[in-house]
Image (cartoon, rainbow, N blue to C red):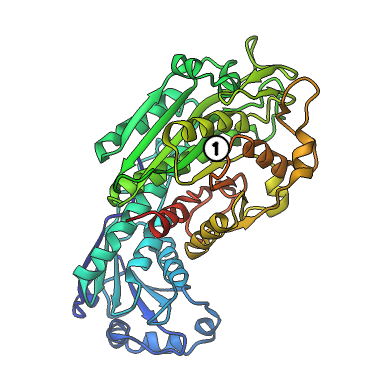
Amino acid sequence: MTTPAEIQFKDVDLDGVATASGAVAIFVDADGKLDAGARKANTLTRKAVARFAESEKFEKMAAGDVATIAYPAGLTAETLLVVKLSRRPSSQEARKAGAQLAKSQGNADLTVCAGSIARADEIALGLALRDYRFDSHKTAEKPSKSSVTFMVAKPEEVAKSAAPMAAIAEGVFFTRDLTNEPANILTTDDFAARLAAMHELGLEVEILEEDDLERLGMGSLLCVGQGSDSPSKVVVMSWNGGGDEAPFALVGKGVVFDTGGISLKPAGGMEDMTMDMGGAGVVSGVMRTLALRKAKANVVGLVGLVENMPSGNAVRPGDVVTSMKGDTIEVINTDAEGRLVLADVMWYAQERFKPVGMINLATLTGAILVALGHENAGVFSNSDDFSDAFIKAAGSEGEGAWRMPMGKAYDDLLKSRVADMKNIGGRMAGSITAAQFLQRFVKEDMPWCHLDIAGVASVKSETALAPPGATGWGVMALNRLIADKYES
């Protein structure tokens, strides 16, 4: 697994600014005022920092931006990184500053002269999240991990507040690794094994094999993987950090590769379907975070792991399957497979755990990209209060989420001539009819959100806190929701 940078916090040592190797970061606020670390660097560099703070380039920088002064006179460091940031930045400004430092750091050791700047822990989180590389399959020699040291006024306090954020970073990295991994490596067996290994963190992990799923009547899920040589599975992860109350449930779609099945996808871009297990990846990352930070909540995470392949045994358009709930489904398009997986796992989660609330996540539809692009996940819900709570949590973590409509008119599009429902409702409103399908497997009075993360799970260009590829979107938002709403 890719691990975040280990960040050390120590007392401010202004004399150490002169002798620190690699890169040194200092902070200057918007009006050009220098803090103690910046003043020390300014003296050592013969007022180069003050001159830069008065420049047009500095004026054009936004909060959290970083500028580089190469080979600064008077310093041992090869680069001096000037961060434009107020002494009391917002959480998002602080994280942006950290991310920009990670980009500017390169492979050099980094000393951050944070002094008494508020949210140094958030700066460290942003740095850790952006300092990610998925290079395990590259044979070239990899650079060794560089060191990161924050000099702060109260290192023990900052280290204590940064500890749960380090757990978040590790959860995000776990999600990114899973989502980036090629499908010949991350098979259903391998995925389940990686999750089983988390029992070492205190999670209870149970793997349901195909025989178990058949006994439970999960015909909807099993039909998706029947054309593959990889066995379908459901993995149940339980974190029992609260009292005796019922758990909160997370359910993730884990299609490790999606060819579309008999309704075969076009060849162009099919390689991106290694990320079709992104929902299961997020659930896994959240569960890892909760265990690492010893969350005082009861949470169960369930993921349905399948591979959607065409073969002589694959499910066909026109086939009728029976879900665990007992409802029959006419499969019109085998490429609308994620909802078939989620339907059974959601029903099982409710039957077995009787949760206080349930959120499912899936890279479910291309339609959500048309609607929201790569900026927001689609949020569908049967509860205004529940969806508002999630969207608030996502906003506080800088993760875009947007409420989408639902209604009977969309539900009517799923009517089937030969079964209780079809698995698609036609070309129009595709993300909404997918949500309407899932809602049929939500029990009455169960607070529920469906998150369609097809546009945000993996992207071609970098984001504020991630390089191109898997983003880990949702780990921070769900961790915040659990902390705010369910922790004792």
32 or 205: which is nearer to us?
205
Q: Position of residue 320 (x, y in %)?
A: 69, 18
Q: Quadrant of the C terminus?
A: bottom left
61 lies above or below 417: below
From the image, tell me which residue sits under label 1.
275
Three-letter amino acid code at the position of disc 1: Met
Which residue reaches farthest front? 445
Q: In which quarter of the image is the N terminus?
A: top left
- Which residue is pictured at 50% across the width and 82% down the height? 58
- Which residue is pictured at 40% across the width and 28% down the height? 192
The residue carrying pointer 1 sits among few (fewer than 14), some (14 to 19) or many (20 or more) residues within 10 Å by Cα, namely many
- Which residue is pictured at 71% across the width and 44% down the height? 432
122 or 341: which is nearer to us?
341
Tell me the SS state at disc 1.
helix
Q: Which of the 4 image quarters holds residue 423?
A: top right
Q: Where is residue 68 in the image (x, y as percent from the top left)?
A: 43, 72
416 lies above or below 372: above
Q: Which of the 4 image quarters holds residue 91?
A: bottom left
